[in-house]
Image (spheres, coloured by chain):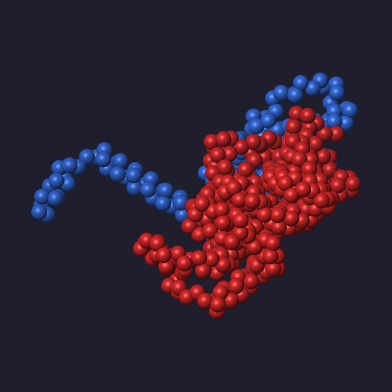
Amino acid sequence: MFEFETNGFVFPNELHVHWTVMIVLYPYITGLVAGAFIVSSLYHLFGKEELRSIARFALVASFVFLLFAPLPLLMHLGMPSRAFNIMITPHPTSAMAGFGVVYLTYLVIVALEVWFSMREDIVQNALEGGRVKKALFRLLAFGDLRVDEQTRAFDHKVVRVLAGIGIPVACFLHGYVGFLFGSIKANPWWSTPLMFIIFLLSAIVSGISVLLFLFYLISWLRKAPYEEGVMRTLAGYLWGFLIIAVALEIMEVLSIAYEQMPEWEVLSFLIWHKLFFSYIIVQNVVGSFIPLILLALVNLTNLKPRIAHLFVFVSSVLVLIQVLAMRWNVVIGGQLLSKSFRGFTSYFPGLFEKEGLITAFVIFTLPFLILRWIDKRISLFPLDCPIGQARR
Amino acid sequence: MKEDKDTIATKDFDPERRVILKGTVATALAIAFGSLPRKVVASYKAQDHWYGFVVDLTKCIGCGACVRACKAENDVPDGFFRTWVERYTFLKDGKVIVDSPDGGLNGFQDNLNIPKSVIAKTYFVPKLCNHCATAPCVQVCPVGATFVSQDGVVLVDKKHCIGCGYCIQACPYGSRFLSPHGYADKCTLCYHRIRKGDKPACVLVCPVGARLFGDLKDKESNINKVLAATRHGVLKPELGTTPKCFYIGLDQEVR
């Protein structure tokens, strides 16, 4: 019945895709926040000693990503000068209005946890070096330069409690981002109660992957030996969460197809034609299938450490690409589909426009630069671990 | 001093100037009184009304006068539409072709190069905001900038809207757009006109009476009479948006 070959019919107001690559980036960065936080909590709360060397890095990375998460949203708003209306006059029935509350709550928790976990280093910095540096760090330590067994125990306890509170809030933050899409009944590509769980799981796998990627990158740059404990532990978690994430993503689509829902006709065209490269090739074959095989080999067979490191590194890169593709396919894919269910519009971001690729690249690079800047001042890795020892 | 003033006044007297002065005063008074709220506005109670819209698909000829009138009345930016007209062409082999060139702004001049012999039937479908009673766009607005007015019109406070575009995503009918000025925009049923008792511009100009506007709360209103006498439907009823725009002669292919 349908004529999609010429992209069919779209409502005249639908020619413009309103949610651009900025809105692809927002859930991507938020996902890294939630995932990295959960990794840090595996050590701080659940006592996974193998992750000691990257636990604090994970926590600070989560904090820095969180600081940058709203930036793409701000770039996207038609009226950015009114952004604070969302905090001042939140509309109770809107999922999006929860942003202010959820974001700020989480920001406070993570900021406090970062501060408590770094207090000893802050104090140390306040005691040595130039006058300006001393003064600044003294201010950052709120003037309390006491460090002994008692304060250490207290800091440790607070970090544990904050990690405990932080996990459900992190889940809520990312679940909420999924719900933003999942609750749009007008859009059959978005509207599913599974959306928030899918978003949460993809957040966790992207968070683990970005940490693995940075762990390898930094170890390589510093010529430090790759720690096997970190790799084995994270490879296990990544594999487990990736299995659930991919299974849910595929089951969601399969159930629409199997039930032969009326929307399947357009959705199958969306998947097989409009999103063939980003959904079938990148998200499912390259980003899901290959890492699942590689991680299965690492976890189930007795690979030599060198090969295992290589497989895990490749998997981390592929999963990072998978999750980015998944965000793209959800956010952009859902808007390509006309609500007339009779056609599709097209979108690809320009290089130099306000919401273009260069803006996206800059926003995404900034948190990494900030992380490096912090690490130059206070080591984000414990100094008794290989990656921390090799710090230059 | 006093003398001086009088002398000057007498000396400078110019009959022509008096006429101009008189005219100016008269015009000013006319504008002042004209801009006073008319009786109908002064006594207007929003809660006494609940507006709805009826489109008679059996009447529409696809001239696009409504689209042009809307654009002129509401200064709708180029490339966006508060109302538009779709053309449905059914071929004898079962294919359905839908088009809306420029939203029907200039009517439907070309025949898509389809030979008459293969066409089974055609009809036009004017579209506009459905002014849903349970509007999903209103539900999702994060700052409460869009709302259903007491008289049942879905409106946007353009001074409060942050331009996030969530309402555009939530509208199942494609009735909203982000204005080039940065805020969400849509059909207001010509709220500035209906408050004064006038018809929306599109209703006023429709040459065949395919568009009807009226008060659903008023049992004797034109649209209540028409709705009582005809078979009609709403778009995408399964989404539970309770549209208040009713279509006479609605076909299942129209979404």
Which residue is at the front of the view, B51 or A346?
Answer: A346
Task: Relative to B99, say whether A93 is above or below.
Answer: below
Q: Position of residue A168 (x, y in %)?
A: 69, 66
Instruction: Please name the residue shown 58% across and 35% down the image.
Output: A350
Q: Quadrant of the C terminus of chain B?
A: top right
Evaluate whether residue B15 shows in this view: yes
Chain the render paints red: A
Quadrant in the rendering for residue B250: top right
Evaluate whether residue A27 shows in this view: no
Which residue is at the front of the view, A289 or A282?
Answer: A289
Q: Position of residue A358 (x, y in %)?
A: 55, 39
Q: Is residue A317 left or right of residue B181?
A: right
Extreme-bottom residue of the structure: A150
Q: Is residue A126 left or right of residue B19?
A: right
Instruction: Please name the residue shown 79% across and 48% down the image.
Output: A303
Which residue is at the front of the view, B88 or A8?
Answer: A8
Q: Position of residue A30 (x, y in %)?
A: 63, 54
Instruction: Please name the residue shown 78% across and 29% down the image.
Output: A5
Q: Quadrant of the N terminus of chain B?
A: bottom left
Q: According to the rendering, which colour does chain B have?
A: blue
Instruction: Please name the residue shown 10% across and 50% down the image.
Output: B4
Task: Relative to A42, say whether B185 is above or below.
Answer: above
Q: Is residue B130 left or right of residue A77?
A: right
Q: Position of residue A207 (x, y in %)?
A: 67, 54
Quadrant in the rendering for residue A342: top right
